[in-house]
Amino acid sequence: MIAIVPDPINVLQVVESVIDPAAGAIDIFIGTSRNISHGKKVLYLEYEAYLPMATEFLDRIAATASERWGTRKISIVHRTGRVGLGESSVVVAVSAAHRREAFEACRYIIDTLKEDVPIWKKEHFEDGEVWAGREGSTITPE
Amino acid sequence: MRIQVKLFAMAREEVGSSELSLELPPGSTAQAMLEILCASYPRLKPLHKHLRIAVNREFVKPDWQLSEQDEVAVIPPVSGG
């Protein structure tokens, strides 16, 4: 299951989608929206995606992880639109014969997603809003 | 040649539109397109060096030659996850 969706993610459904009789492990990463960013109180997040490109990239990342670690099943689901505090913005689930492959593939997927997939996060604060930049930096257009 | 350009996130907000049409000399590169875009929309200038270009849903190098039927997108720093 590779999807970019405007509605809340059903985490259990994503996990169940990777259940496989040949798997001895399922690793799950859940990205959740934090209430503090750069020392400021966050009200909610908003995500935007370049849907066709982002979906193709997620497919490719899953294919690369599957090939590299010989995983059984991979699901990646990312939210768009307004995401409230504590809600899941992204869920990655990987099943594999053994836990090591599942852990490593899952880490590769979320790390690569953050680097290259055309999805953007806007943080809404009490006193304004800002698009998040790369790795903790924020770019505020003048 | 006329190129349709998609804009996202901060680039979309600075331009005030999610898609626009640019008139470029035939054979223009991705870099030339970006320069013309930033000249036409000065509010994009502070972002210029952070912007990547995707053509047909793949990132391209600055010297990539555009053609009229390409799907061109301006990609600001991504922040999914």
Image: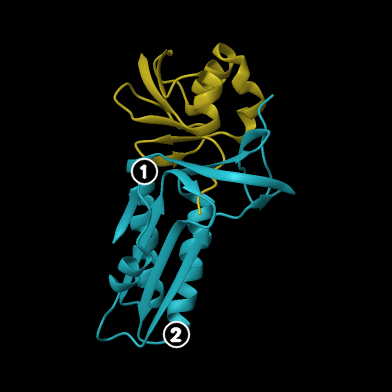
Chain colours: A cyan, B yellow
Q: Residues within 10 Å of mark 2 (few under 14, many from 20)?
A: some
Other residues around mark 1 within 10 Å, as few (<14) / some (14–19) / many (≥20): many
What's the residue type where badge 1 is placed? Met
Gap between marks 1 and 2 measured at Cα? 31 Å
Q: Name the amino acid type tagged 2.
A: Arg
Left or right of residue A27, residue B37 in this image: right
Between B30 and A52, the one nearer to me in the picture = A52
Determine which residue is flagged by label 2: A99
Q: In the image, which disc is placed on residue A53? A: 1
The secondary element bearing badge 2 is classed as: helix
Q: Nearer the viewer, mark 1 or mark 2?
A: 2
Q: Position of residue A114 (x, y in %)?
A: 53, 54
Q: For the residues tagged 1 and 2, is the chain the same?
A: yes
Q: Which mark is residue B77?
A: none
Q: Residue at x 42, y 28 (%)?
A: B65
x and y percentages locating residue B25 in the rendered image:
43, 13
In which quadrant is the N terminus of chain A drawn?
Answer: bottom left
Q: Position of residue A71 (x, y in %)?
A: 35, 77
Residue at (66% x, 37% y) in the render: A126
Q: Chain of mark 1?
A: A
SS category of the residue bearing label 1: helix
